[in-house]
């Protein structure tokens, strides 16, 4: 009792203080650590005044509850049993209700002013959710542990499941660290070296730290209240209790000293151990029970079971060393003893498990039972000791189906595909009944070869025959095999036939459709999945977001984003990263940035996705993001640098290069490649080529390809070929660069020779290889070689739109227009280039009307002609002499197609008019040009316009003037004399260039009037007349 300390106060109220726990001392916590008049000094031997004691306002009664806590005791054993019913958090409200009910029925009331409850357990569910959410929201546990606890734990159940216990154990023992959950921002009290795991206990399904708000203060209290002089002064411990005073008692089972006679029966001890395992007892509880089992001595027929339960209890708390000590001290060990410890070592990846394995061999249990051997397989497999695992399996005299399944899965996970197949066949041949695990294990090992696909189809038949055709786990594994083997038809058929499907099934199918470039079908399947009431998972959203990214469908993607938000996954790092990638590909970088900020635990991949989005549009923001990434403590990887280098400017490049070297990424092939590309893009070609000198050994393949490409672009073809000839294993890009270099240097024979060598080296040509060689066939007009290449393209299944366009051009220019049309008709997805190439080929081969008809069909198909397509149709008109039709489309280019005529279009129409004798019309076209005519236009016009000396003034002199690089004062314009065009002129700074229309080499002889006008203007120093 702490009396009111303020003098003169009349009738101060009485405050009854009860501490919770359950079973924690009100004297230790309330009086000595929280609200009492005194605090205990750090020496634990004296007191000091509490400046903020509550007894300044009221009389306070600190009551120990329940019986057995602190110095309280009882002579009635039922009180002790009641004290453990986990209801301590309800004492205050229940007592208040009792008083309230009493006052309603009695005239002499108890003057209850109210009650205060702090951090109480009101009910199991809310306490559980609240506690775990507090841990997670304060970064004490990871997202994974938080989700695992919410998924595995039923907060309303009386008992917890093993999965729930494991989730809690991992969070507290491996993620909490040395943090006091009651005061997470203050230093913790140092613990003893022997106590490495946090002491935790359950309140129904909820974990609480036993220590109080200040653990060291509790230590002071424990020392102080165990002093004999203190106990004497307090008139406490009058019964001379045989144990030390502690702050909390009930869950530490010290009260069990009253029950030693009761627990003489071993079955009761076993039940207690099982109960402790179920409710997740503390380390102290387990130690007490362990000590009790030792003091009780051996119990016939039950000691081994008690000891195995003690081992399990220690292991559930992460105390593998304590469990091992119990195991080593066992006079007798069973299969359960070995399995329990071996499994624990296997999960922890602890090599000490090998000594337990040796003991199992020595004791003979390995030969007597399949359980020990199976556990050893898991132990050695988790350590990567495959040779030892093989020996264990071969030496096992007794093998259960679980043993076979475990070994099959071990082989599958480590890439022993053939051995896994043989072992499965042996298992089937033995006539042993197969299980789901058998099929899942063998299917998980199959890869993407045709042989594996055939084996998978046989497994499929066996599944149906054995009655596992509708088992969801097995079906999902088989679908995964079909996906890996790209057997999409078999996959879809199996999916349609299975009556039961879960989210994993749908996810596997949707992901397969996305990866097989069928995003629309993936989205349709996702909608079907939603209609069936299946809740999309993280993997589902990632797959469908990737589908929207592939389609660049921003509307659909934003709808999926809304579903992600409704599902509460917008903060998930994997889903969030997929959204960043989607918005970046749709050029919505602001939305991508918002998604990035919503991710709670960002990783390097999420940073890279956002940086890539900005880098793709060559934004300097990518550099700023890299700086922010470094400032926040994230370590960029090679991909981060390769992406940032893509958009780096000259001013940033050298700093990035230095950072790459400092962080040790300069030897990474893709980073080195990005550096070379960055230097090249910024015009620092010499610095890009300097990487050749910095490396003593030949550069890796990709950087070598990039530098060879630089040589190709600068017409240094021999250097490109020489560089790539140093590579031991050139890739297909290397061969393509060499073939292109030979083609550009007009070494035609070497092009075909390298193509043959490429086949000999077992390098499969890609579409770029075929394009280069086909272009060479086109140039040489080698229809025979082009046809052979066409056959190879069909055989390699590369007949896409890109290559078919090249084939149409090759056949057209080689005069085989029938093959051009045939290839065109076989193309499934025709683009503007496809139609343009066909129109050009038809025009070249004299089929002008057919070319025009195809052009009009293209417009009817909804394809908008580009400048090249319009040039192709104008050329066809030119070849066919269709003047009026050509003029009509030429004049409508700007209005109908939004493309103003360019030099090539003017050349086509001038050439057509000149050939048709419509010289004046051609003159008008040239006069209306918004830019100077080029040599081709003049050549076409003058060739058919009567200028017999066109070559000299229009070509040679014009080229000479170009070399002078004189500033132009007035661009080309027609000059007039007598109301007619006398010629064309261009005025330079200090020089005037003029032509005389219709004149031969001796101009005054052929056109005296025009020559005279030219001369007068010259003498007058005036420009030639424009009208």
Image (tube, helix red, strand yellow):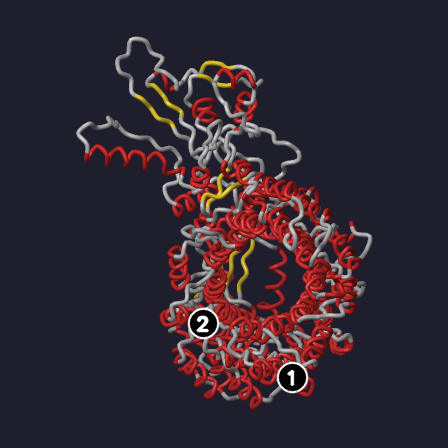
Question: At x 42% / y 32%, what residue is drawn?
Answer: 65
Q: Residue 423 sits in which quadrant?
A: bottom right
Residue 662, x across and y down, in percent: 69, 42
- Does residue 337 sit above or below 800 in this rendering? above
Return the disc, 1 or 2, that comes first in the chain's sequence.
2
Q: Nearer the viewer, residue 638 or 245?
A: 245
Residue 565, x across and y down, in percent: 39, 55
Question: At x 67% / y 50%, what residue is drawn?
Answer: 684
Q: Nearer the viewer, residue 325 or 883?
A: 325
Residue 670, x across and y down, in percent: 67, 56
Identify the secondary structure beneath mark 1.
helix
Q: Nearer the viewer, residue 76 or 394?
A: 76
- Does residue 837 sit above or below 620 in this rendering? below
Quarter holding the C terminus is bottom left
Q: Provide the residue designation for mark 1.
A: 795
Disc sitting over residue 520 in the figure: 2
Q: Nearer the viewer, residue 792 or 131?
A: 131
Q: Residues within 10 Å of mark 2 (few under 14, many from 20)?
A: some
- Furthest residue toward left: 107
Disc 1/disc 2 C-alpha distance (Å): 28 Å
């Amino acid at each position: 009792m702490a009396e009111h300390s303020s003098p003169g106060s009349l009738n101060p109220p009485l405050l009854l203080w009860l501490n919770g726990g359950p079973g924690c001392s009100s004297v230790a916590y309330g009086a000595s650590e929280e609200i009492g008049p005194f605090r205990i000094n750090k020496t634990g031997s004296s007191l000091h005044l509490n400046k903020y004691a509550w007894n300044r306002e009221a009389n306070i009664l600190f009551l120990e509850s329940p019986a057995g806590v602190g110095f309280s005791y009882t002579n009635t054993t039922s009180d002790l049993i009641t004290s453990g019913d986990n209801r301590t958090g309800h004492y205050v409200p229940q007592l208040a209700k009792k008083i309230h009910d009493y006052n309603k029925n009695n005239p002499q009331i108890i003057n209850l002013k109210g009650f205060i409850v702090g951090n109480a357990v009101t009910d199991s569910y809310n306490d559980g959710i609240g506690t775990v959410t507090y841990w997670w929201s304060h970064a004490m546990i990871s997202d994974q542990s938080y989700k695992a606890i919410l998924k595995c734990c039923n907060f309303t159940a009386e008992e917890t499941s093993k999965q729930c216990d494991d989730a809690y154990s991992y969070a507290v023992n491996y993620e909490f660290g040395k943090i006091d959950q009651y005061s997470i921002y203050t230093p913790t009290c140092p613990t003893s070296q022997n106590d490495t795991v946090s002491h935790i206990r359950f309140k129904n399904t909820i974990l609480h730290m036993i220590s109080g708000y200040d653990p060291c203060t509790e230590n002071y209290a424990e020392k102080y209240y165990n002093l004999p002089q203190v106990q004497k002064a307090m008139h406490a411990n009058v019964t001379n209790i045989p144990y030390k005073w502690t702050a909390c008692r009930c869950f530490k089972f010290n009260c069990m000293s009253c029950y030693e006679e009761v627990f003489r029966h071993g079955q009761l001890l076993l039940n207690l151990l099982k109960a402790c395992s179920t409710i997740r007892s503390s380390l102290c509880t387990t130690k007490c029970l362990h000590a009790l089992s030792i003091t009780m001595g051996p119990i016939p027929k039950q000691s081994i079971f008690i000891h195995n339960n003690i081992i399990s209890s220690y292991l559930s708390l992460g105390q593998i060393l304590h469990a091992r000590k119990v195991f080593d001290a066992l006079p007798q060990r069973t299969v359960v003893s070995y399995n329990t410890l071996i499994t624990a070592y296997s999960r922890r990846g602890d090599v000490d498990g090998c000594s337990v394995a040796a003991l199992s061999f020595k004791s003979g249990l390995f030969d007597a039972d399949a359980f020990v051997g199976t556990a050893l397989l898991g132990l050695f497999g988790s350590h990567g000791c495959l040779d030892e695992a093989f020996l264990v399996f071969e030496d096992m005299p007794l093998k259960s189906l679980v043993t076979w399944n475990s070994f099959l899965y071990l082989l599958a996970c480590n890439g022993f595909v053939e051995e896994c197949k043989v072992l499965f066949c042996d298992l089937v041949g033995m006539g042993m009944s197969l299980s789901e695990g058998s099929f899942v294990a063998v299917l998980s090992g199959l890869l993407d070869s045709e042989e594996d696909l055939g084996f998978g189809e046989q497994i499929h038949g066996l599944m149906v025959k054995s009655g596992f055709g509708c088992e969801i786990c097995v079906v999902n594994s088989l679908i995964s095999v079909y996906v890996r083997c790209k057997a999409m038809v078999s996959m879809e058929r199996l999916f349609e036939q299975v009556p039961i499907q879960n989210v994993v099934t749908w996810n596997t199918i949707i992901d397969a459709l996305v990866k097989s470039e069928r995003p629309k079908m993936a989205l349709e399947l996702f909608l079907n999945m939603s209609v069936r009431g299946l809740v999309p998972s993280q993997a589902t959203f990632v797959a469908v977001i990737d589908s929207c990214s592939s389609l660049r469908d921003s509307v659909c993607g934003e709808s999926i984003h809304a579903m992600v938000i409704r599902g509460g996954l917008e903060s998930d790092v994997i889903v969030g990263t997929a959204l960043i990638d989607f918005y970046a590909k749709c050029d919505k970088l602001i939305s991508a940035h918002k998604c990035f900020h919503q991710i709670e635990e960002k990783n390097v991949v999420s940073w890279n996705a956002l940086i890539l989005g900005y880098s793709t549009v060559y934004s300097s923001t990518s550099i700023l993001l890299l700086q922010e990434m470094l400032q926040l403590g994230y370590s960029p990887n090679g991909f981060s640098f390769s992406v940032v280098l893509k958009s780096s400017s000259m001013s940033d490049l050298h700093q990035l290069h230095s950072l790459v070297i400092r962080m040790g990424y300069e030897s990474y092939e893709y980073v080195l490649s990005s550096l070379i590309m960055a230097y090249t893009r910024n015009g620092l070609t010499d610095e890009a080529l300097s990487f050749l000198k910095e490396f003593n050994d030949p550069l890796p393949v990709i950087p070598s390809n990039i530098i060879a490409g630089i040589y190709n672009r600068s017409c240094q073809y021999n250097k490109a070929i020489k560089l790539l000839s140093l590579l031991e294993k050139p890739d297909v890009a290397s061969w393509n660069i060499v073939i292109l270099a030979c083609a550009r240097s007009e070494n035609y024979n070497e092009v075909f020779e390298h193509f043959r060598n490429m086949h000999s080296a077992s390098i499969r040509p890609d579409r770029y290889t075929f394009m280069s060689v086909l272009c060479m066939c086109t140039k040489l007009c080698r229809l025979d070689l082009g046809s052979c290449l066409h056959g190879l393209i069909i055989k390699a299944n590369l007949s896409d739109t890109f290559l078919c366009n090249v084939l149409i051009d090759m056949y057209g220019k080689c005069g085989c227009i029938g093959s051009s049309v045939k290839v065109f008709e076989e193309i499934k997805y025709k683009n503007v280039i496809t139609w343009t190439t066909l129109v050009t080929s038809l025009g070249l081969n004299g089929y002008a009307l057919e070319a025009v008809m195809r052009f009009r069909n293209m417009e009817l198909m909804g394809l908008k002609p580009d400048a090249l397509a319009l040039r192709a149709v104008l050329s066809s008109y030119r070849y066919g002499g269709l003047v009026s039709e050509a003029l009509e489309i030429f004049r409508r280019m700007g209005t109908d197609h939004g493309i103003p005529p360019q030099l090539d279009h003017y050349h086509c129409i001038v050439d057509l008019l000149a050939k048709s004798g419509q010289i004046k019309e051609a003159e008008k076209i040239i006069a209306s040009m918004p830019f100077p005519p080029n040599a081709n236009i003049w050549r076409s016009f003058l060739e058919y316009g009567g200028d017999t000396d066109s070559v000299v003034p229009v070509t040679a002199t014009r080229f000479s003037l170009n070399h002078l690089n004189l500033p132009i004062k007035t661009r080309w314009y027609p000059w007039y004399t007598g109301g007619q065009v006398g010629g064309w002129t261009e005025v330079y700074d200090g020089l005037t260039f003029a032509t005389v229309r219709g004149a031969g080499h001796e101009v005054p002889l052929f056109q005296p009037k025009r020559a005279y006008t030219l001369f007068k203007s010259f003498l007058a120093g005036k420009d030639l007349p424009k009208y």
